[in-house]
Image (tube, grey):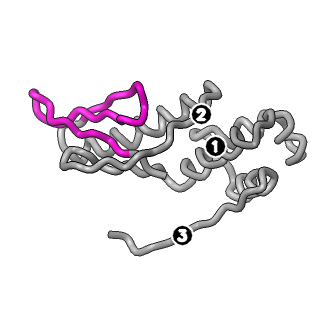
Amino acid sequence: MEYTALFTPSEDGGFVVTFPDFDWGVTQGDTEGEALDMAADALGMMIGEHIRKGEPLPAPRTRRGAKYRAIRLPALHAAKAELYRAFLAANIRKSELARRLNIPKTNVDRLFDLKHQSRLDQIEAAFQMLGKELVFTVKDAA
């Protein structure tokens, strides 16, 4: 899962970073590398806040141009965000998912919490309860 960030050169040097798919959130960095790191943190925070509030995640749209950079979520965060999307699409309550998984409701909250280090087997089981399959792709690094 990745979203496109807009890197705008700052008058003071460095870059100001915004995410066109989100209606809020801004970060910055003194160098492009620092701005990329800050953008990854900001993206995780914005997605986590949407999940915390029970709001749907915006669909990532690809944008082209010299000022745009793709920001990818870490694998575990991406799995949790996709699980959250599948959960919303299933139109069930957290208590129902907890019942189906035979776990406490607080554990369901942790499955969506990007700050919690959930076990992959628990995430996979939740996908299965929602009629989904978790699939990984491994490719050579660029």
**103 sits to left or right of 76:** right
User: Helix or strand or loop: what does disc 3 sit on?
Assistant: loop
Nearer the observer, 8 or 35: 8
Residue type (three-letter) at the residue carrying disc 1: Arg
Residue span colored magenta: 4-28
| Image quadrant occupied by the C terminus | bottom left
C-alpha span from label 2 to label 1: 7 Å
Give how far across and how far down residue 110 sits, in percent: 69, 39
Q: Do tag 3 and tag 1 residues touch (Cβ < 8 Å)?
A: no
Residue type (three-letter) at the residue carrying disc 2: Pro
- Magenta stretch: residue 63 in it? no
Q: Nearer the viewer, mark 3 or mark 1?
A: 1
Q: Do tag 3 and tag 2 residues touch (Cβ < 8 Å)?
A: no
Q: Which residue is mark 3?
A: 137
User: Helix or strand or loop: what does disc 2 sit on?
Assistant: loop
Nearer the observer, 89 or 109: 89
Q: Which residue is mark 1?
A: 85
Q: Which residue is mark 2?
A: 56
The residue depicted at 24 percent of the width and 48 percent of the height is 33
The residue depicted at 45 percent of the width and 45 percent of the height is 60
Count residues near mark 3 (Cα–Cα under 10 Å), then give few for <14, some for 14-19, many for 20+. Answer: few
C-alpha span from label 3 to label 1: 19 Å
- Mark sitting earlier along the chain (2/1): 2
Q: Do tag 2 and tag 1 residues touch (Cβ < 8 Å)?
A: yes
Give how far across and how far down residue 46 sits, in percent: 47, 32
The residue depicted at 78 percent of the width and 57 percent of the height is 128
**84 sits to left or right of 27:** right
User: Helix or strand or loop: what does disc 1 sit on?
Assistant: helix
**36 sits to left or right of 89:** left
Residue type (three-letter) at the residue carrying disc 3: Thr
